[in-house]
Every structure is written in structure tokens, then in C-alpha cells.
Amino acid sequence: MIFGGQDIGIDLGTATILVYVKGKGIVLREPSVVAIDKNTNQVLAVGQEARKMLGRTPGNIVALRPLKDGVISDYTITEKMLKYFITKVCGKFVFSPKIMICVPSRVTEVERKAVIDAATHAGARKVYLIEEPIAAAIGAGIDISKPYGSMIVDIGGGTSDIAVISLGGAVRSTSIKMAGDKFDEAIIKYVKRNRNVIIGERTAEDIKINIGCMYPKSVSERMMVKGRDITSGLPVEIEISSDEVFYALQECAEKILEGVHSVLEETPPELVADISERGIYITGGGGLVWGLDKLISEKTGIPVMIAEDAQSCVAIGTGKALNHVELFESGNAIKIKKY
């Protein structure tokens, strides 16, 4: 379905790209993966089709993620990917769309410029940047314009953005490079070290989604996975338990807890009182790992809620912010930059 002449919001995620069209909602959700021919530098597939090629390509074809840890690691490929998705949503537009893109809260000016340039060259008329925790809060239905504190823990694929928001801006925030991709890496390392089996990224992600946990489960769950035996080099099928995944993700959970604690420690007492009353909101796909909300609540003593449709909160918030661009331009509202 093509929505020509529409303004769009883009959640430019490390793992997934979501596109929100003003007045229509989320119209596209695809993996942030591009397959290219190394010999000709030609793009062969983007999104879901390219993801199927991860780890399964011949020598001349490489399937890669052009974003790493929440920022652009391959500018040229990111531009091609953005152009593909914008054209897919808007078609061959007569009027270039206004595009709002979310970025991690601690990105540098150089990283911001890379996002702006990529979107501009991909066909945007104007580019606006909004910080991920702000967008996540809007998408979660929080009225961030009020003078009370709200805490957001947005865990994506590349970064976890933790922020305390009041009066339309982030009072205290941090962005840590510990999120969904690092969870997958931790599972891969655990299985290799403790079971002498090498598994791929997609298998690790399946384990995380199906039996992953960051808080002990009362009943252990099990899952059969396939990989390669380190000793023999032959295919092997093993059974993994949720208890094993819990131990694999311990360090990841501790890093996120440290981030939450550090932001709370720097937050003014009045806002901490608001947060203890209103609770902490978890958004992002990485936040759906079972038990993370219980763990944070236990360690902080603050109620923790997983936002409705947590995976889409940032994209929804980015899109909704398009309705108030005139306020952002005048500098009266949310901290947002126009380029």
C-alpha cells in the first residue's frame, strides 16, 4: 500500500525499522538488513528478504546490518535502505515527505548529521530528529508536557535508552550499548562455552524470544535447538533450558540495572517521588524478555509496567510528534531538532 505525499515518522532501529504514516499508523515493519553483491555493490534485497540470507550467503553476497549500537555504521548502505523503505511507503512522490527520525539520547553531532544526510539523500524534504526515550514516552501514552516525572526504559536492538522526562524534555538520561543484540551474543557465548556448540544469531534470537528470562522462573522451560558441535564440526541438536538462558543473561540484566540506578541517583528528589508513585515504563522489543520488569521492580522498589505494544512505542511516538511540528519549530515544546 502506497501513501503518497504523506509525512512519515521512522524508528530507525538497529534490528528493525518501523515506518509510521501520519493519519494511518504503522504501515511498515521490516528487519534492518540489506543484502548486497560485493562485486557490483548492487543491493539485492532489503528487509525481510535480506534477513533470510543472514549466515546463508555465497562468497560474493553479504547480508549485513548497516546500523550498529543504535547509530549508522555504514552510511551508503543505510541511505540505500532508507530510500527503499521511503519509496515503498510513499511511492514515486511528487512532493517530498517531511520525515521525523528517532535517535538514541546520547548520539554525537556527527552521528546526528549522518542520519540527517542519509534521510535527505533518500528523498526527505525536511528532517526532524527526536530522542528515543521522548518518542517512547509519547508512544506509551504518557503526557510528557506535565510538570511531573516519568521514567522510561527503552530497550531496542542496539541501545537501551533510560530517561526521566518532565515538562517535555529529558531531565536525566543515559544510553547504554546493552540491548537485544547483546542479549543474543550472550546466549551464543554461553552455549559455545558450556555446551560446546556453535549456534547462529537467528537461533539465539529464537531462544531469547521463546524461553529467555532475566528473573528465575518457577517452572523451567525447554527448547530444542540446532547448531554445530565444536569438536566434531558436525550438526547437532541439543536441548536448552530457561534456567541456562537466565544465567547467560545475568550480566546483561546487571548492566541495565546499573543504568537505571545511575539515572535515578542523578534525578532530583521531587521527580524520584513522582516516579515511585507513577512507576517505570518499559518499551522496546528488548524489554519483552520475561522477568525484566520483575527484576527492576525488585531491585528499585518501584512498580514497573511494560507499555502496551512495547515494540511499536518509539515509532508511534515519532509519528505522533509530526502533529506538533509547528510547536517544535518555535521551541515551545519537546526537545527536537529541525534540519
Image (cartoon, rainbow, N blue to C red):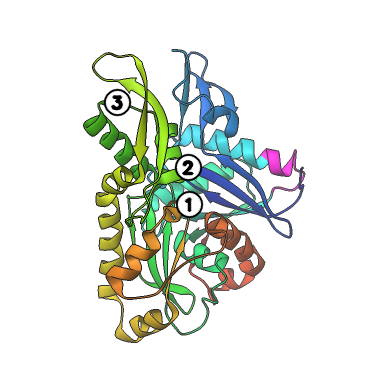
Q: Type of residue at label 1? A: Gly
> Which label belongs to residue 311?
none
How crowded pointer 2 is (Cα within 10 Å; few <14, some 14-19, many 20+) is rated as many
Q: Type of residue at label 2? A: Ala
SS under mark 2: loop
Task: Name the residue beneath numbered marker 2.
Answer: 15
How crowded pointer 1 is (Cα within 10 Å; few <14, some 14-19, many 20+) is rated as many
Task: Name the residue beneath numbered marker 3.
Answer: 197
Residue 22, picture quadrant: bottom right
The prevailing secondary structure element of the residues shown in magenta is loop
Residue 12 percent coordinates (x, y) = 52, 48
Residue 283 percent coordinates (x, y) = 47, 60
SS under mark 1: helix
Q: Which residues are magenta?
A: 87-96
Q: Nearer the viewer, residue 132 or 332?
A: 132
Q: Residue at x 57, y 59 (%)?
A: 309
> Which label belongs to residue 285?
1
**Front position among marks 2 and 1:** 1
Q: Tell me whether circle 2 and circle 1 mark residues in contact (CB < 8 Å).
A: yes
Q: Type of residue at label 3? A: Val
Q: Residue at x 37, y 65 (%)?
A: 294
Query: How many marks are shown on the rendered structure?
Result: 3
Please tell me which of labels 2 and 3 falls first in the chain. Answer: 2
Is residue 269 visible in the rendered structure shown here?
A: yes
**Front position among marks 2 and 3:** 3
Q: Tell me whether circle 3 and circle 1 mark residues in contact (CB < 8 Å).
A: no
